Amino acid sequence: MVHRRRMFQTLDPDTLPPREMYQHMISFITPRPIAWVSTVSPEGVTNLAPFSFFQGITAKPPTVLFCPVNDREGKPKDSLRNVEATGEFVVNIVDFAHAAPMNATSAPLPFGESEFDKFGIASTASTKVKPPRVATAPVALECVLHQIVRVGEGPLGGNIVIGRIVLVHIDERVRGADGLCDPAKLDTIARLGGDGYARTTERFTVVRPG
């Protein structure tokens, strides 16, 4: 078999502005699940914001991570400030029905202004942590802080927030016959590059080797 020579663009992160490197990364690390993170300040003001650098880590103990970057002035975002102060957060899983309100909460609001109130998003009390969860989210993960790892300073500097799941809420409407979440019913969305999103409506199965 003859392989045609392929041309590659080469990127050196040391020579690129952080914002440009970020744009490249979100264009090829796809699709990315979205953590819609709710937190509360020590004064009791709620916050809700989406993060697409998000992933599950382990099942023992059950842990997840999300990565809030500093803003363009190098200041920590509200979600990070609240988690640092309280040690608690909730990850709300985003389905297609919540795409618009989730996107609305990405708007930069002044610290101390609640996205729940600003955008009319219904909340309900969590059981083991103080931050509320999105009342209509299909799945919500109550989490306590395990560790914050700093991986950068200044504008767009990274922070890895690792949380231990202490309680899970699953809407009965998204469960399958086996008791697990049915992908077709859950209908999650994911971030692509720029303003692009993907929807989990096309799926295929590959049997893992034994």
Image (spheres, rainbow, N blue to C red):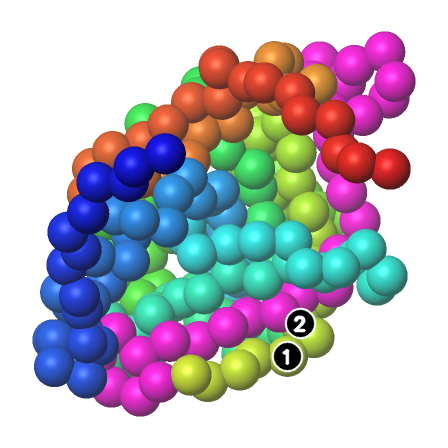
Res 145 label:
2
Q: What's under tag 1, amino acid-wise?
A: Gln
The Cα atoms of the two marked residues, 1 and 2, are separated by 6 Å
Location of the N terminus (image quadrant): top left
Category of crowding for the residue at label 2, using alpha-carbon neighbours closer than 10 angstroms: few (below 14), some (14–19), many (at least 20): some
Judged by depth in the image, the label closer to the viewer, 1 or 2, is 1
Q: Secondary structure at mark 2?
A: strand
Res 138 label:
none
Near-viewer residue (143 or 61): 61
Instruction: Evaluate whether residue 98 shows in this view.
Output: no
Identity of the residue drawn at 74% across and 26% down: 207
Q: Which residues are magenta?
A: 152-181
* 19, above or below 151, in the image: above
Side of 34 where 203 appears, left or right: right
Relative image position of residue 31 (x, y in whole percent): 41, 39
Q: Within the magenta stretch, is there residue 64? A: no
* 147, above or below 166, in the image: below
Location of the C terminus (image quadrant): top right
Near-viewer residue (13 or 208): 208
Near-viewer residue (183 or 45): 183
Identity of the residue drawn at 45% across and 71% down: 80
* 201, above or below 90, in the image: above
Relative image position of residue 74 (x, y in whole percent): 23, 81
Residue picked out by circle 1? 147
Identity of the residue drawn at 76% across and 18% down: 175
